Image (cartoon, rainbow, N blue to C red):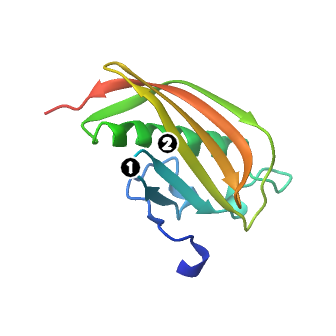
Amino acid sequence: MTDTDIPDGFEPLSRKSPLTEPWEPLYAKKTDKAVIIGLRLARPHTNGRGLIHGGLIAALADNAMGYSCAQMTNWTTSFVTISLTVDFVGSAEIGQWLAIESDVIRTGKTICFAQSLEKADDVVIARASGMFRVVPKKG
């Protein structure tokens, strides 16, 4: 994979986790209101039928919405997932660009509400919503 395979504005995702490590390389694009996660779909992202696995979509939606909540608070707090709902409305295949585009609905003192659209080559394949508990960062 070359950098020309990655849409403009995306850079390597700086926040790593053991869960997403096998799915690398992951990319992020920050806006004023969100962190968009993207990746070029490959074999490690598929289910037994060769389509992109719903678990990948759910995990990345969870990450993108949580990061977007953190971005809206200038990364001064952390968030843990209270609830996550994903509706699958399509599918994606190896080679497509998957982007998880989040929108923070409301951030309060204790809970952040967010939603996202998961798009494969700009076609919506899923939508997700989540509630995230505010966890103050320790000194």
Q: Which mark is residue 63?
A: 2
The percent position of residue 80, horizontal first and vertical second, equals: 41, 28
**Residue at 57 percent of width and 41 percent of height:** 61
The percent position of residue 130, horizontal first and vertical second, equals: 54, 28
Rendered position, 75 above or below 133: below
Rendered position, 6 above or below 37: below
Counting other residues with Cα less than 10 Å from the Cα at mark 2, is it few (<14), some (14-19), or many (20 or more)? many
Report the amino acid beneath label 2: Asn
Rendered position, 35 above or below 81: below
Which image quadrant is residue 54 in? top right
Rendered position, 13 above or below 7: above
Q: Nearer the viewer, mark 2 or mark 1?
A: 1
Can you identify the residue that label 1 sits on?
32
The percent position of residue 39, horizontal first and vertical second, equals: 59, 61
Residues at marks 2 and 1 touching, judged by CB atoms closer than 8 Å: no
Q: Which mark is residue 47?
A: none
Residue 14 in sight: yes
Residue 2 in sight: no
**Residue at 38 percent of width and 58 percent of height:** 14
Which image quadrant is residue 134 in? top left
Q: Which of disc 1 and disc 2 is earlier in sequence?
A: 1
**Residue at 82 percent of width and 57 percent of height:** 50
Counting other residues with Cα less than 10 Å from the Cα at mark 1, is it few (<14), some (14-19), or many (20 or more)? few
Q: Is residue 76 left or right of residue 108?
A: left
Q: Nearer the viewer, residue 120 or 49?
A: 120
Work out which residue is located at the far top of the displayed protein and give it: 110
> Quarter holding the C terminus?
top left
Q: Is residue 138 left or right of residue 37?
A: left
